[in-house]
């Protein structure tokens, strides 16, 4: 099994990245989040990969982080959920945000992903909520390399500030996780405090 690729990025489109390693071009299906964070063409790139072998095909999927790869494997472990749905969900959400919706027993947001109706979203949440229950929201936020720089820095600072105010790490991370990740640290703290005060 091909676990990772390091080589020259020679081609991309909306769903694919081709990485040349030792003169061989490996076609990887990628999420929009990974695609957005790829370097310019002809630059060196590293991708975590997962191979899906079927009777009629051998497909390789590439991810910028182990968190995204793990989320993909988790989603596609659901009966009837294939790689196409896994990519669609991880193109619509970061790995952490997707896990948060599942952990919070909240299937409706998942329907924003292409090909995911409410019944499928409910089944995904039902089958996975116990599996992600041991992974607290605090642990998700402590994981590096998820999403963009704002997500990594501002949210972690906001969680730390809420902890300093007496909230548990899990409470703080859960409240921040429901907010727009593009907000400043100060705005994240203010809105998270409102959420916590309402007991949501």
Image: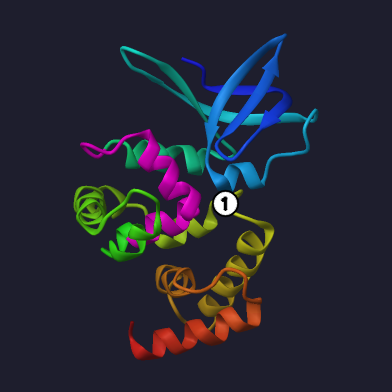
Q: Would you place residue 43 above or below residue 38 in this image?
A: above
Q: Residue at x 33, y 85 (%)?
A: 199
Outermost top residue: 23
The segment highlighted magenta reads: 78-101
Regarding mark 1 in the picture, which secondary structure is present there? loop
173 relative to 37 in the view: left or right = left
Q: Would you place residue 196 above or below residue 96 in this image?
A: below
**Does residue 182 appear in this view?**
yes
Q: Residue at x 77, y 32 (%)?
A: 41
191 relative to 168 in the view: left or right = right
Residue 186 place in picture, x, y as percent: 64, 82
How would you classify the magenta stretch by its main secondary structure? helix
Residue matched to label 1: 146
Say which quadrant the C terminus sits in. Answer: bottom left
Q: Hey, which quadrant is residue 197 in on the image?
A: bottom left
Residue 15 place in picture, x, y as percent: 55, 37
Q: Residue at x 31, y 59 (%)?
A: 103
In terms of depth relative to the viewer, which is nearer, 175 or 24?
Answer: 24
55 relative to 185 in the view: left or right = left
Q: Residue at x 45, y 89 (%)?
A: 194
Q: Would you place residue 56 above or below residue 107 in this image?
A: above
Residue 46 place in picture, x, y as percent: 67, 30
């Amino acid at each position: 099994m091909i676990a990772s690729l390091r080589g020259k990025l020679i081609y991309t489109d909306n769903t694919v990245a081709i990485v040349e390693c030792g003169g061989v071009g490996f076609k990887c299906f990628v999420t929009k989040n990974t695609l957005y964070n790829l370097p310019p063409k002809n630059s060196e790139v590293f991708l975590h990969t997962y191979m899906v072998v079927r009777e009629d095909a051998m497909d390789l999927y590439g991810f910028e982080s182990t968190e995204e790869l793990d989320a993909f494997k988790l989603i596609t472990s659901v009966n009837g959920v294939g790689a196409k749905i896994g990519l669609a969900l991880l193109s619509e959400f970061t790995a952490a945000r997707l896990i948060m919706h599942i952990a919070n027993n909240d299937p409706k947001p998942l329907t924003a992903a292409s090909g995911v109706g409410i019944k499928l979203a409910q089944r995904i949440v039902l089958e996975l909520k116990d599996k992600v229950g041991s992974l607290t929201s605090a642990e998700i936020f402590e994981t590096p390399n998820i999403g963009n720089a704002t997500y990594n820095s501002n949210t972690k600072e906001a969680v730390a500030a809420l902890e300093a105010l007496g909230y548990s790490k899990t409470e703080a991370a859960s409240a921040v996780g429901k907010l727009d990740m593009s907000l400043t640290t100060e705005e994240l703290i203010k809105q998270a405090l409102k959420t916590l005060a309402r007991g949501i």
